[in-house]
Amino acid sequence: MLAVTSGTVTIALTQYMLKDGFLYGPAGLALFPTVSAVVVTRARQAPLVNLPGFILVLVLLWVQGIDGFTRLNVTMFVGTGIFASFILALALEHTARYGFQLELKLEEQAHLDPLTGIANRRRLEDRAREEVERARRFNRPLSLMIMDLDHFKGVNDRH
């Protein structure tokens, strides 16, 4: 996040030092706020990360005595970048949450029999591994009981 703020500050200072820099180069000020959408962990942080750079740009415009259309133009470019970063951050956050939910659903489906909803062999093996580790960790005995029902296939096929 510091890199984003530093980038915005660097571009703002460069435009401040160049003759008519704010007049011809405000598009660069929209770049770094947009990039901030990738580095924030929550979408609501995107505008806050860009606030120091935005304040600096306003101060530099005021110090340089720029007013009128150029001040509005530069402010709108920076504001558009901040708005775009917020929208992009929202989309990325939504996509990440959806992907995580999908991953959990797929993991659950991989461990359950689709017909009965009962845990399958893969889940049994995972659970057994967890319990063996727990017994070792707490130095506790562990028992396992397995039942086999004769002719269960017929019951399963009928019901």
Image: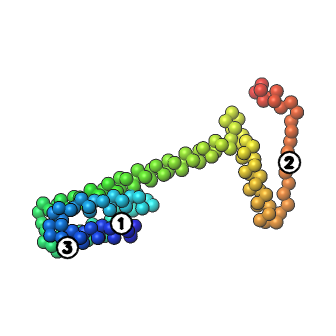
Q: From the viewer's perspective, is 25 left or right of 41?
A: left
Q: Is residue 130 above or below residue 110?
A: below
Residue under pointer 3: 17
Residue under pointer 2: 145
Residue 140 is situated, as x and y percent measured from the top left of the image, at: 83, 63
Element marked by disc 1: helix
Alpha-carbon span between mark 1 and mark 3: 20 Å
Q: Residues within 10 Å of mark 2 (few under 14, many from 20)?
A: few
Discs 2/3, front: 3
- The disc placed on residue 28 is none
Q: Residues within 10 Å of mark 1 (few under 14, many from 20)?
A: many
Q: Evaluate whether residue 62 shows in this view.
A: no
Residue 30 is situated, as x and y percent measured from the top left of the image, at: 28, 59
Alpha-carbon span between mark 2 and mark 1: 59 Å
Residue furthest to the front in view is: 18
Say whether disc 2 or disc 1 marks the residue closer to the N-terminus.
Answer: 1
Given the image, on which type of amino acid does mark 3 rest?
A: Met
Given the image, on which type of amino acid does mark 1 rest?
A: Val
- The disc placed on residue 4 is 1
Given the image, on which type of amino acid does mark 2 rest?
A: Met
